[in-house]
Amino acid sequence: MMARRPQSLRIRRERAQALKPILAGRYPGLTVSLDWSTPLELLVATILSAQCTDERVNRVTPALFERYPDASAFADADREELETLIRSTGFYRNKAKNIQGMARMLVADHESRVPADMDELIALPGVARKTANVVLSNAFGRHEGVVVDTHVKRVANRLGLTAETDPVKVERDLMKVLDSADWHAVPWRMILHGRQRCHARKPDCAGCEVRHLCPSADRV
């Protein structure tokens, strides 16, 4: 499935436009499922969500954000205590290292504030384009790219919007087939579709609202 030859850009753009109103009708909300109240909280929660469900992250972050209310608190945190608080999210040692490194850079270089700039965000430890796009779109209303997680990558491939597997290349393809005004909404709805319909192992093709547009329907 992943290696099939991509269709023309025109066909992929037409399919993306046809998908847009259907996905909007099925998933009208655009609120990220992570709980947060500040850009820093969203950045930390997104780092924690790597290879972890948002639900589990949301169970961890209330105590975490109470213990560390700002970048300085994260920067000065006892590493073992921080690891203990986020242990259940998995890969906790690396996540704690990245969160603390990120916070120290915010304190040193950004007046303890999360920057609203792609290049500055991806320079922070633990922050790649996916995390940066989540923060920019949801915390600052800036849509400079497309969020590509495992759901978006899978759904975009099955829908024939890309034949790539590398997240950066998938993002590049989606930015070509989607209008810039849709860079936030459509990928977020693809995430929800991946969670609720287009599952990795057993997709619900029979109940899928976009089955008639999907070249992979009943073949995955």
Image (cartoon, grey):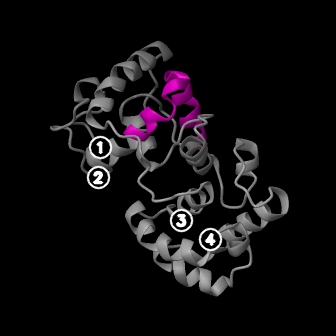
Q: Nearer the viewer, residue 128 or 164?
A: 128
For the point 32% across and 31% down, the residue is 23
User: Magenta residues, as a range?
Assistant: 168-189
Which comes before the other along the chain, label 3 or label 4?
Answer: 3
User: Would you identify the image quadrant in which residue 7 lies?
Assistant: top left
Which comes before the other along the chain, label 2 or label 4?
Answer: 4
- Which marked residue is nearer to the observer: mark 2 or mark 3? 3
Binning the other alpha carbons within 10 Å of mark 2 as few (below 14), some (14 to 19) or many (20 upward) gives few
- Look at label 3 and name its amino acid: Leu
User: Are the residues tagged 1 and 4 within 8 Å (C-beta)?
Assistant: no
* Residue picked out by circle 3: 48
- The CA distance from mark 3 to mark 1 is 24 Å
Q: Is residue 178 magenta?
A: yes
Predominant secondary structure, magenta span = helix
Label ID, residue 69: 4
Res. 169 in view = yes
User: Would you identify the image quadrant in which residue 187 lies?
Assistant: top left
Indicate the position of residue 114 as horizontal and vertical percent values. 70, 54
* Residue picked out by circle 1: 198
Which comes before the other along the chain, label 1 or label 4?
Answer: 4
User: Are the residues tagged 1 and 2 within 8 Å (C-beta)?
Assistant: no
| Above or below 20: residue 114 | below
User: Are the residues tagged 3 and 4 within 8 Å (C-beta)?
Assistant: no
- The CA distance from mark 1 to mark 2 is 9 Å
Which comes before the other along the chain, label 3 or label 1?
Answer: 3
- Which marked residue is nearer to the observer: mark 3 or mark 1? 3
